[in-house]
Image (spheres, rainbow, N blue to C red):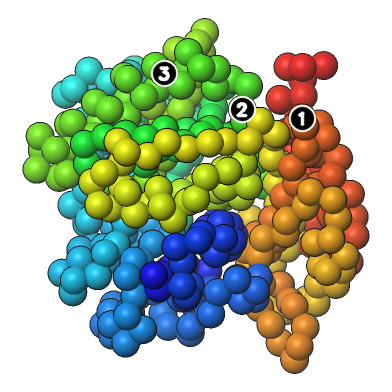
Amino acid sequence: MNVLLIGSGGREHALAWSISASPILDKLYCVPGNPGIEAVAECVPISVNDTEALIDFACLRKIGFVMIGPEVPLVAGLADRFEAAGIKCLGPGGRAAILEGSKGFVKDLCEDFGMPTGKYRRFQDCARAKFYAATLGYPVVIKADGLAAGKGVIIAGSKEEAGKAIDSMFDGAFGAAGSEVVVEEYLEGEEASFFALTDGEHVLPLAGAQDHKRVFDGDKGPNTGGMGAYSPAPVLTPEVVEKTVETLLKPTVRAMAERGRPYMGVLFAGLMIKDGEPKLIEYNCRFGDPETQVLLPRLKSDLLTALLAARDHVLDQIDLRWSDEAALTVVMASKGYPGSYEKGSEIRGLYEAQRAPGVQVFHAGTARRDGKIVAAGGRVLNVTAMGASVEEAQKRAYAAVDLIDWPQGFCRRDIGWRAMGRTS
């Protein structure tokens, strides 16, 4: 089978790395891909926004299955277009991808179907939003309703901060994503991510992870797209996982079907867990980044077979096996991220890092220029390691990081601290 993977980041490198090992794969293509993905797939320079070119390419190369990595093309309905062209594609259609495309929709769904989440209200009026925020008290969470590249969430610690956040969103700080604002109760507890596949009826739990969103050690500084992650996450006990599946994931799949928006693909639940009780923060309609980079190294079963089973509505016939080992990934980013940063600096030592015991280096924001690998984004590399424990995986990951010669990059040095704090 010929497979087309769409995307260019660390998540897509991890997906390509895993899919490339499948015994049912004939040829893997990735659009547009990156220099790391080139080792396991043929990368094709087509824009993910050029739908007609993507479909033409898929027809020309006799693609039997398409996997879409990023959220923007999913919300835009790219999966619908492939299916309409007779090409199998895993991913929610545009109507179902509203689970990520509208935070307010998800909160309404939770309220209507009794799924655990925080208090909230949706607003298109600035004054009303500020008044409601004051009734919830501080800190309070202010969210742009639509897609905002992971930046449309502000935790406001005071009335003044909440007012500025609401004003900025209605003033267009996040474009059309902020035309409606969701004001939410601040949930206390421990945050974690849990993933599952669904074929629209059945739910197949995958695994969980925890990521580190703050840019600096000790969870200091501004939020980022994620500076590292590890799996398994100790807070996701078997009991918490069961509650997540039974009180959130399965009811969500049923609710989407009842609403005429059948959901097929990856379900990524962002959770807040307190006293063993999970509440939903938000849903994403794709694999997480950098969580995928620690989930897939632990998967011992064939990923492509599971993805196809979800697309073909036979997910109940699949059983997955997972490694008992832990995986941890360290994000190496360009200095200045998540603010402004320079591109084009050369990265050396990747070969040596890749050869370190138990290590896989995933490319997230790199380019190839004059035979050299250079930084081409904010989050640039994901140095992932396996180990018997989170502590061992961390030691291996940082040993590999230290083999990489890139003065213009930086990373956190405490990824996994919460998990090790539980076991120390």
The local crowd at label 3, few if under 14, some if 14 to 19, many if 20 or more residues have their Cα within 10 Å, is some
**Residue 346 screen position, x and y as percent:** 80, 77
**Can you say whether 262 is above or below 362 in the image?**
above
**Residue 147 screen position, x and y as percent:** 36, 53
Residue 5, quarter of the rendered image: bottom left
Tell me the SS state at disc 2.
Answer: loop
| Number of marks in picture | 3
**Can you say whether 410 is above or below 196 in the image?**
below
The residue that label 3 is drawn on is 242
User: Of the residues shown, which amino acid type is indicated by label 3?
Assistant: Glu
The residue that label 2 is drawn on is 233
Q: Residue at x 18, y 31 (%)?
A: 254
Q: In the drawing, does residue 359 fall left or right of residue 290?
A: right
**Which numbered dot is residue 389?**
1
Q: Residue at x 84, y 50 (%)?
A: 357
Q: Residue at x 80, y 56 (%)?
A: 410
User: Of the residues shown, which amino acid type is indicated by label 1?
Assistant: Ser
Q: Marks 2/3: CA distance? A: 14 Å
**Residue 333 screen position, x and y as percent:** 71, 58
